[in-house]
Image (cartoon, rainbow, N blue to C red):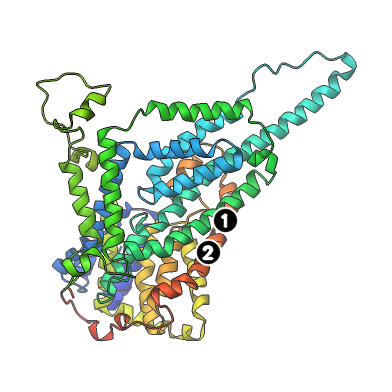
Amino acid sequence: MLSPAVLTDRRPIVGCAYVIALMAVYWCTEVLPLAVTALLPAVLFPLFGIMESKQVCMQYLKDTNMLFVGGLMMAVAVEKWNLHKRIALRVLLVVGMRPALLMLGFMGVTAFLSMWISNTATTAMMVPIVQAVLEQLNGPRKGENPLPTPQSQENGTEAEEQVGEEEEEKERMKMCKGLTLCVCYAASIGGTATLTGTGPNLVLTGQMSQLFPQNGDVINFASWFAFAFPTMLLMLTLAWLWLQLVFIGFNLKRTWGCGAVQSEKEFAAYDLIREEHRRLGPMSYGELSVLGLFILLVVLWFTRSPGFIDGWATHVFNAKAPFVTDATVAVFVAMLLFVLPSEPPRYLCFWRTQRFDTEPQPTRGPAPALLTWQVTQRKMPWSIVLLLGGGFALAKGSEVSGLSRWLGDQMMPLCSVPPWAIAVILCLLIATFTECASNVATATLFLPILASMSQSIGLNPLYVMVPCTLSASFAFMLPVATPPNAIVFSYGYLKVSDMAKMGIVMNIIGILCITLAINSWGRAMFNLDTFPSWANTTANITTGGGGEK
């Protein structure tokens, strides 16, 4: 664990570089759990004289962590009340069972759900639905016993039947691969659209606040959604076309149903989805309450500081300082989940009389809340909180040790490279690295370095940090790259080579979409042609263990 370079050279900059390298190796190899590796700065920074222990520990719970906690509590409530399943089944009933539309339906609903709940939970819910639909579409046909044939024609008929069965089996397997791959790809793509949709997005907003405290809240829920949502839609559409081309084809009659009648198998699959939706029953009071709070959360996020106009917090709460942030909204709505009851109050008698499962219970106590702490503890991915905190500690250590400034100076030759080329090269690097490391760990390692590089060459930091944040979610090639890939791979339809071949093209599609986005509407939104004043932090960089700015 200890390197001779650290033992012989006690400069803080050397110690900080060693800690970053050590954590990078540990995160890639997972010799320790990711969250445990994220705690290394709390031990090594004080030992190497980089930062005082109390200053390091303060980095582990920031505004971004609370935004993550509040957003994930809402996601846990949505899962608990099965709202995500109801939405998914309803959309599938609307799009129908035609292969192309079915794939579009699965991708659309998976991407939408992963915008608000975790990619892993979305995939874990959607893949069993895909499996059930595939069983109906690919099941053996009923009453297909072959008619007896003359002996002279028997051999030829058997050969033709065997060839036909092999071709049909190939088509079935291609359909299985396409529908399962589309779910894990859509989950990774959809999570990029919102600030709380996936970990790297939260790392970005946290690092922006940490490294550029005067940035004026340039990355918030509304501004990120305005940039990333169109990018996500473009990439999702191209991914759908690519998967359809490879696994389904563009036969309008077969894949779109133009001029064709639905088969018995498609009717059976549709009936299965309809039956699953029927089993959910009518929406309960608890479901409607969670849905109402979810809508409230999204509306408050969008209207707090939309950018093109003043938001509700601009003059009421944030006139003197940014007191209210997206984290404030998330925690407020999350607390309501523990306050509001899951059953209608007594004064809503009309609601109680409409419930089919209500029986007189005169001694019944108060109704449970919409969300309980036991459920929250069990379903919350607490390790991400430590991962985010470890990233903030690394960024602060790089700043106070002088490593950030040194790395920036080493990248001065990049001044002669066009900014768009720099962004493309870095996106390729990040997309490759994230195949063998956690997306949060990847963003945590690279974003502070990219910020230093952009400062040293006079480039707007957002020009490289935003594209690379999105690229950290492009784990399309390997089953181990991200949990959604592993879930899909476990069903046995795919080989590693299948994912690798499809994933290479998906990475290219993603980087092309990001390049288009950042050089078109992203350039206008974030004013990327100028070097912002908030990025000029030379005067604020300290060389010792200073306090919070």
Determine which residue is flagged by label 1.
238
Residue 23: quadrant of the picture: bottom left
Residue drawn at x 41%, y 54% is 191
Nearest to the observer: residue 190 or residue 477: 190
* Image spot of residue 486 (x, y percent): 46, 44
* Image spot of residue 27 (x, y percent): 37, 58
Q: Is residue 267 visible?
A: yes
Residue drawn at x 34%, y 29% is 282
Q: Pointer 1 and pointer 2: residues touching (CB < 8 Å)?
A: yes
- Against 255, residue 545 (above or below) is below
- Which part of the image, by quadrant, shows the N terminus? bottom left
Give the CA distance from mark 1 to mark 2: 9 Å
Tell me if mark 2 has few (under 14), some (14-19) or many (20+) residues whose alpha carbon lies within 10 angstroms of its own: some
Q: Is residue 216 left or right of residue 510?
A: left
Furthest residue in direction right, as rendered: 152
Residue 439: quadrant of the picture: bottom left
- Against 340, residue 201 (above or below) is below
Nearest to the observer: residue 532 or residue 455: 532
Residue drawn at x 39%, y 68% is 446
| Mark 1 secondary-structure assignment | helix
Q: Is residue 317 visible?
A: no
Residue 104: quadrant of the picture: top right
- Which part of the image, by quadrant, shows the C terminus? bottom left
Q: Is residue 419 left or right of residue 2?
A: right
Say what amino acid the circle numbered 1 marks.
Answer: Leu
> Which tag, 1 or 2, sits closer to the chain's start?
1
- Against 372, residue 475 (above or below) is below
Residue drawn at x 21%, y 65% is 313
Determine which residue is flagged by label 2.
513
